[in-house]
Amino acid sequence: MFRFIFDRDTWQEIWGSISKNKVRTVITVIGVLWGIFVYIALSGAAKGMDNGFEKEFKDIANNSMFVWIQRTSMPYKGFKIGRSFNLRLNDVEVLKQKHPEIQFIAPRNVKGVFGDAPPTVVRGLKSGTYTIFGDYPDIDRIARKKIYDGGRFLNDLDIQHERKVAVIGERVQKELFDIDEDPVGKYIRLNDIYFQVIGVYEYDNQGGFEDDSTIFIPFSTYQKVYAMGDIVGWMAIAAFPEVDIVALEKNIKQTIKRLHDVHPDDERAVGAFNLGEMFGKIIGFARGMNLLSLIVGLATIIAGVIAIGNILLISVKERTKELGIRRALGATPREVRAQILLESVFLTVVAGLLGIIAGVGVLAMINAMLPEDGGFPYTNPTVPIPYVIGAMLIMVILGTLIGLIPAQRAVSIRPIDALREE
């Protein structure tokens, strides 16, 4: 069999058969080519979107959310509508105990956003206004902070001892420190209190309130500096990967309502942004795109392969006399069948390879045209190699199966009947 496949005469016969009607062959091959092209293009597009969002939010816990307080919309237990209240540090401990699905929880406070004037920070003769965050170390586990070499982020001892330390953004370093001056170990003045710089934060635009003019200080120190007591501005919460983040959000809201005497049906009192739910929708959309590409591509490939089968049936009919002569000269049914099957597989594979090349070329062009600043969550639209190999195997199998029909037709021709054909 292998000798037959690699025989030069076999391929000369196949080429002669294909070249008899070039236009018909090319049009039919385009059907298979278009199917694999659609599959590659759609799969690559879905992968590019998946890669883009993964890159955009690579340092943020996927199964996370942010919770804050708004005004009530329903009266309850003697409280009037429109009541405002605050989250408290004790709420954090209660949420940890009642919801073991929580992996990390970080209470946060901030000065310089939500219409609040940014505080002035001074170093020597230089000064500027910057956003000040009071944070726990767990915020770095929920949304990873990139710290330049030689520095560090806040730790538990900073919280415990209410240390006057700060992690500053790149713009803060640029405006308050000299060029080539290492800010780590130096001091800045906030609210007439000196803070030692322990790290410089590399800004990476991932949304949220932080930017390159951010300064992080320990939550406990922030509370003392601004006399906040146990008030919490909002919470960042990350659940374990397997947890249903949407259900957890509802449960957390209900717990907060119970703690602060809010009507259980009040949907406005506790606000939340569920990043995990958004990620779930993105992943679901990408999977839907992959499924769509598979269905559309496979349907188009099947249609193209069927067209190839029809071409070969016509070819067999046109070559009836030739096949009869070959049978009369001693060609076995196995050899005739193998030639037709080989012709079917050859056309299918050639069409598939051309479709893959066209699809990869289009994806490469799209990738080249994407903005380099990462402003659009789409990057590196490629198709995994196993998907491509799988598509090629499917095409070979389909080409073989569809080739069995004309091959059997060719074998069924009796030499004596073929020789009578005009």
Image (cartoon, grey):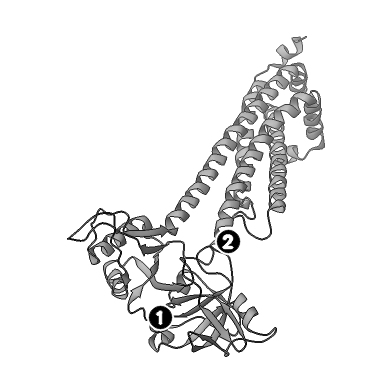
Left or right position of 132 against 360: left
Task: Tell me the residue at 43%/61% (across/down).
Answer: 63
Q: In the rendered image, which residue does mark 2 sit on?
A: 55
Determine whether the residue tagged by mark 2 lies in a helix, strand or loop: helix
Nearer the observer: mark 2 or 1; the answer is: 1
Q: Quadrant of the C terminus?
A: top right
Q: Quadrant of the N terminus?
A: top right
Per the model, the C-alpha gap separating discs 2 and 1 is 36 Å
Specify whether residue 338 is in view: no
Around disc 2, counting alpha carbons within 10 Å, would you say few (fewer than 14), some (14 to 19), or many (20 or more)?
some
Task: Name the amino acid, label 1.
Answer: Tyr
Work out whether residue 260 or residue 334 is closer to the camera in this orientation and state it. Answer: 260
Position of residue 80 measured from the top left corner of the image (x, y, whole percent): 23, 58
Position above or below: 311 against 359? above
Around disc 1, counting alpha carbons within 10 Å, would you say few (fewer than 14), some (14 to 19), or many (20 or more)?
few
Work out whether residue 396 or residue 203 is closer to the camera in this orientation and state it. Answer: 203
Residue 245 occupies which quadrant of the picture?
bottom left
Q: In the rendered image, which residue does mark 1 sit on?
A: 226
Position of residue 211 measured from the top left corner of the image (x, y, whole percent): 56, 69
Task: Name the amino acid, label 2.
Answer: Lys
Task: Tell me the residue at 23%/57% (across/down).
Answer: 263
Position of residue 394 measured from the top left corner of the image (x, y, whole percent): 60, 40
Task: Give the number of the disc on residue 4.
Answer: none
Total number of numbered discs in the rendering = 2
Position of residue 226 measured from the top left corner of the image (x, y, whole percent): 40, 80
Q: Mark 2 or 1 closer to N-term?
A: 2
Work out whether residue 342 or residue 106 is closer to the camera in this orientation and state it. Answer: 106
Work out whether residue 323 or residue 277 is closer to the camera in this orientation and state it. Answer: 277
Residue 199 occupies which quadrant of the picture?
bottom right
Residue 359 occupies which quadrant of the picture?
top right
Determine whether the residue tagged by mark 1 lies in a helix, strand or loop: loop
